[in-house]
Amino acid sequence: MSAISDPEILANSALTGRSRLSQLSVSKLVIWALVLFLCVTPFALIIAVSFGEKIEGASWEWGFSLANYQRVFVGANWPEEVTFLYLQNLYYSLYYAVLAAILAVLSAFPFTYLMTGLSRRAQSAWLVFILSSLSLSEVFIVMGWDVLLSNRSGLPMVVKETGLTDWLKAVGWFDTLREWGLANPRNVKFKTSVFATVLTMSYLVWPYAVILLYPPLSRMDRSMVEAAQTMGAGPWTVMRTVILPAVRLPLFGATLLLFVFLLGVYVTVSVFAEPAKQTMAVSVYSAVRGATLNAPFGAAQAVILLITAGVFLVLGQWMSRRAAT
Amino acid sequence: MNGLSLKGIYKVFGSARAVENVHLDFAEGELTALLGPSGCGKTTLLRMIAGLETPTSGSLHLGSRDITALAAHKRRFGMVFQNFALFPHLNVRENVVYSLVISGTSKSDAIATGERLLDLVQLQGYGDRRVGQLSGGQRQRVAIARALAQEPEVFLLDEPMSALDAKLREDMQVELRLLQQRLGVTTIVVTHDQREAMTMADKIVVMSRGKVEQVGAPQDIYHRPENAFVADFIGKANFYDGVVEDGKLRVNGSLLETNSPANFINGSDVRIACRPEVPCLGRRDVAGSQLKATVTFVRDVGPARDIHLKTDIGPMVVEYARGEEQDDYHVGQDTIVTLPLDGLHVFPEPRQDAS
């Protein structure tokens, strides 16, 4: 009896073993497929669409045309006529993003450094507050700043009512502000300006800057600062020779990350940037959803923006690896 | 005279008194050890001397100069930190000459001084290494060289040996002491290790609970502890509680003779300490109190031998160095132990603290 049942049991267990193995590999396969689908498909689709062709008065069709890319770089009527309109948009994307990322990191750095010197309780209270501010959407923040910077009811009104405008005119700085595009003949104005765009963009990512800088700064060995002090270093020398070099890589990394993030900002730019100084993100959107309804052209711009971000990330990686060795 | 003196130093953190009414003088060129258990306020005291903490009250003077309010970076007392606090973004030489570079010393002078200092701490040829490539002992040497580069008037070390392994620690203690004597710099070392303090220091300051318990030369502190805490913390001791009775001590019914409790009135409670190397075993020719004893345990640790006894006054440990004349004691053996007249330290019963 037992002689018969033994091979049966063996066969059964072999079967369950095999089915368990296949179950495992199936679930693994499903997860991989899902990841692949979610991560790769949108990009692949956009890349594919960017080679498509627009049908006048209608939608677009699949194809393999480099016309959209040509239009991004030198304009639609090349070689008869060359225009760098879209490269200029790309330039402004980079310009705003660089300035705003640097401004955010530079202002978040001293704040975060002081924060890490507080008691544990105070630190966690600040962190919770900053994390919760991340729940504000871009639209909400832009609305707030829109009111704050608006000519009638915002800061310009305060400047005028407090007599600051008259004072600026009296000392002659008002003309300088006009040259910078931060004033009209009557009063200072922030909308629309590079200033307002960069300010709001850096405000947008400021909490991220704090959160990115917090771990390296709180990990930093405070006794290094004290050691420098006992060797004659005043506060500025300590900052310059000890703290900044110790966290230079995280500082650079945070700036890079925020910069790449800011390349895609849409609402802020469309509200605060001058019409002639719009970014590629805005023109992508207007191509896809706006008046022109040219999805392939929008996709081509999006691909260029993506490649730009990728190039900066790779360059940044390379530079920080070089600096670390 | 250009020594450092502390007058009535207090430091209060919230409701906790970290340092209480400390008066100390550090003579020029001397090495002083601040010794005590962790949390006794020794590091806080050192940090106040460095200028990294401000005393709640009291004053610090360097020579005739009041430096109480002087910031750390203006005092420029070289300090070696417990974790060495080397700058990882600088190489060894740059670490060592940091103080010179930020004070604007010319590059050639700084490099020359750097080489001389690396020579001094026996790290010739290590100048270009990264800090991360050094062993613990080498890091400590860099930290010492770095703190000495600015030729400080006072040299401070906060538990400098605690990050080193035991063998290296003993070597470095001797080396540091020799270096300090060669340079003649006023030095203050914080440590919780009494061997370390006794190896290196001209003077030991024993601290507990923010207060100074005793100040003196190492041998003084060992042989003439002023209170039970010091007797307990420095070296080993057998402790007994007793009562003074006509110039003698009554402990658990036995009467001990001593020549020390003259200044106690009859009936006062006392705490008695006896160093383990003091009692004599098995000899009747020594003047003192003789007690019957039974051997309960023998611990042979190589150079010395601890014999644990049961006596009428309580358990006692007697330590013999190798080579001293001795019988071969074994567990259960009955013998006689003699406590010499001058071998007992008698202290008033320590205050029963609420804490």
Image: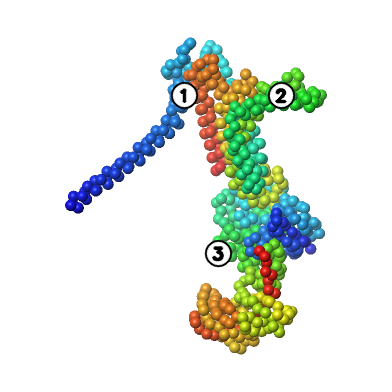
How many C-alpha atoms fall within 10 Å of the one at disc 3: few (<14), some, or many (≥20)?
Answer: few
**Same-subunit check for callouts 2 and 3:** no
Location of mark 1 (residue): A46
Marked residue chain, label 2: A
Marked residue chain, label 3: B
Instruction: Establish if A121 lies above or below A143.
Output: below
Q: Is residue B331 left or right of residue A148?
A: left
Instruction: Please identify the quadrant where the C terminus of chain B is shown.
Output: bottom right
Location of mark 2 (residue): A153
Q: Is residue B70 left or right of residue A198?
A: right
Picture quadrant where residue B51 is located: bottom right
- x, y (%) of residue A77? 52, 12
Which residue: 57% across, 60% down? B164
Location of mark 3 (residue): B167
Check disc 2 and give the amino acid type: Ser
Q: Is residue B111 visible?
A: no
- x, y (%) of residue B149? 68, 54
Instruction: Please identify the quadrant where the N terminus of chain B is shown.
Output: bottom right
Tell me how far mark 3 sits from mark 1, CA to CA.
66 Å
Question: Which comes sooner in the sequence, label 2 or label 1?
Answer: 1
Nearer-the-camera pick, B123 or A114 = A114
- x, y (%) of residue B253? 62, 83
Which residue: 45% across, 31% down? A39
How many C-alpha atoms fall within 10 Å of the one at disc 1: few (<14), some, or many (≥20)?
Answer: some
Q: Mark 3 and 1 residues: CB-CB less than 8 Å, in contact?
A: no
